Image (tube, grey):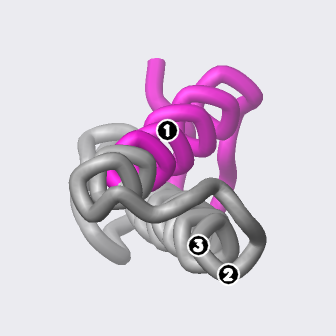
Amino acid sequence: MKSKLFTLDWRNLANGLLIAFLAAFIDGIIKILNTGAVFDWPHIQPILIAGISAALAYLLKSLSTNSHNQLFTREPG
């Protein structure tokens, strides 16, 4: 069961953080490899920022939907 409005269960939290961060991370790594850049802090920092931003966006979306994926709506029933 999905978490209710303004709540997160641990599985939803872990899945969201993992998927959002990995998607941004993999995209950044691919971009670095395509441009031939080296793996140093100036090139890794934007990837980490994008991963954290994507994870926070997912968490905010999850907190604002109910168990039926309806935005800012109370639980039916």
Count residues near mark 2 (Cα–Cα under 10 Å), then give few for <14, some for 14-19, many for 20+: few
Circle 2 residue: 42
Viewer-nearest residue: 17 or 66: 17
> Residue 41 sits in which quadrant?
bottom right
Q: Residue at x 32, y 51 (%)?
A: 27
Foreground pick, 70 / 55: 55
Question: What residue type is disc 3 on?
Answer: His
Residue at x 26% of width, y 41% of height: 68
- Label 1 vs label 3, nearer the camera: 3
Give the mark, 1 or 2, whose residue is nearer the N terminus. Answer: 1
The residue carrying mark 1 is: 22
Residue 22, magenta (yes or no): yes
Q: Which amino acid type is marked by label 2?
A: Pro
> Of the residues tagged 1 and 2, which is closer to the observer?
2
- Mark 1 lies on a secondary structure that is helix
The three-letter amino acid code for the residue at tag 1 is: Leu
To which quarter of the image does residue 6 belong? bottom right
Magenta span? 1-27
The span from disc 1 to disc 3 (Cα, nearest Å) is 16 Å
Asked whether residue 3 is drawn in magenta, I would say: yes
On the image, the x and y values in percent for residue 17 come to: 61, 43
Left or right: 50 in relation to 66: right
User: Residue at (28%, 70%) from the top-left corner?
Assistant: 71
Q: Nearer the viewer, residue 12 or 29?
A: 29
Q: Is residue 63 visible?
A: no
Name the residue tied to disc 3: 43
Q: Which numbered marker is on residue 68?
A: none
Which SS does the magenta portion mostly show? helix
